Amino acid sequence: MNGVLSDSRPSSPADAFQALLEAAAEAGARKALEQVQAKGAASRWIPIKESPLGYRATLDLVKAGELQVHGIGHRRYLDREQLDRWLLAHPIRSNDAPSDDDEIAELIAAGDARREKRSAKRKPAPQ
């Protein structure tokens, strides 16, 4: 029985019962540890700094009362289910600001215009 009853047999029924209880407790503890380790990857709680919204945005939502944070010691955690519900209720909106490509094109055009202006000052006008 996996070391429950080894070569040294208990001298009394009470000792045998105690050995069986200890073995059962150890087996239960092993099973509980396996379950906790299996659930660890899909934990319900995520650290606030690992929020997909970003740390500052998450803090702003907590201050506004839209999300709740639970603390253990100095660490703060978000309920993953609550965060997922908030994300579904607030779809990501695209902003009307120009994209990075537009900004880069504007910078290139401004640089080209500045170079043309400089080259026009350096060259004497043909007569």
Image (cartoon, rainbow, N blue to C red):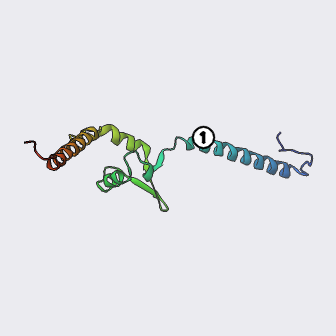
**Residue drawn 68% across the image and 47% down it:** 29
Of residues 77 and 115, which is closer to you in this image?
A: 115
**Residue 58, percent from left and from top:** 36, 51
Q: Is residue 13 rendered to the left or right of residue 65?
A: right
Q: Which residue is label 1 attached to?
A: 38
Q: Answer with left or right where residue 2 lies relative to residue 100.
A: right
| Frontmost residue, 18 versus 1 | 1
Q: Quadrant of residue 60?
A: bottom left
Location of residue 55 in the rendering, given as x and y in whole percent from the top left corner: 38, 53
Relative side of 36 to 101, left or right: right
Picture layout, residue 105 above or below residue 68? above
Residue extending farthest to the left is: 127
Q: Position of residue 16 (x, y in %)?
A: 84, 48
Q: Residues within 10 Å of mark 1 (few under 14, many from 20)?
A: few
Q: Nearer the viewer, residue 41 or 116?
A: 116
Query: Residue 113 in the image: x percent, y percent?
Result: 18, 44
Amino acid type for the residue under numbered disc 1: Ala
